[in-house]
Amino acid sequence: MNQSPLLLLRDVGKRYGDRDILSSVSLRLQEGEIVFIRGGNGSGKSTLLKLAAGLVPLDSGTRSIQPSKMISYTPDRLPKLKMTSDEYLTHMGRISGMNKQPLQDRIKELHEWFDLPYRSKTHLSHYSKGMLQKTNLMQAILRQPDLLLLDEHFLRTRR
């Protein structure tokens, strides 16, 4: 197994306005590793995931990922869009550079795997919370990422 980390955050920080959200956070993720980040509301968990995914810029510190490795991210909720799951996944796949036929094959495969109707005319705006979560996850694994970052809606803990 490769000893260099898949993802490395070193002393990262993030500010919104005059508020420090994260300060001097370091994280090292190895291939095949599962990490659960736990904290109270407003503690910066989602911000940390967005920094790790490269979706928001760091205010301090460094972020590095192994060359040619792909990170995918699911936000805590998918909006109820006026498009079908097929349309949404096709759009997301095309903007990420997937070719048309392999993309359509993958979308069909994912609909079967998640037990959602393929080529349904129902818009996401009419989906249940669970169906939206499935579509959100399907979007994240369209390209079979090396690292999948899931925001809190997929894992719930009991106190």
Image: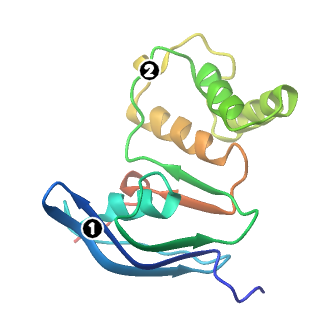
Q: Please tell me how many numbered marks the rendered image carries.
A: 2
Residue 65 is situated, as x and y percent measured from the top left of the image, at: 63, 70
The answer to whether residue 132 is left or right of residue 72 is left
Q: Residue at x 12, y 59 (%)?
A: 18
Left or right: residue 59 versus residue 40 is: right
Q: Position of residue 153 (x, y in %)?
A: 38, 51
Q: Quadrant of residue 40?
A: bottom left
Q: Nearer the viewer, mark 1 or mark 2?
A: 2
Residues at marks 1 and 2, CA–CA distance in whole angstroms: 31 Å
Task: Give the x, y percent position of residue 67.
Answer: 73, 68
Q: How is the image coloured?
A: rainbow
Mark 2: few, some, or many residues within 10 Å (few <14, many ≥20)?
A: some
Q: Residue at x 39, y 34 (%)?
A: 129
The single residue placed furthest to the top in the displayed view is 121
Residue at 58% of width from left, 59% of height from top? 148
| Image quarter hosting the N terminus | bottom right
* Front residue of 134 and 25: 25
Q: Amino acid at mark 1?
A: Arg
Element at label 2: loop
Which label number is shown at residue 81? 2
CA neighbours of label 1 inside 10 A, class few (<14), some (14 to 19), many (20+):
few
Residue corresponding to mark 1 = 158
Please report the residue visible at 63 percent of the width from the left and 80 percent of the height from the top.
30
Q: Secondary structure at mark 1?
A: loop
Towards the viewer: 109 or 69: 69
Q: Quadrant of residue 138?
A: top right
Measured along the vertical axis of the image, is residue 36 above or below residue 84?
below
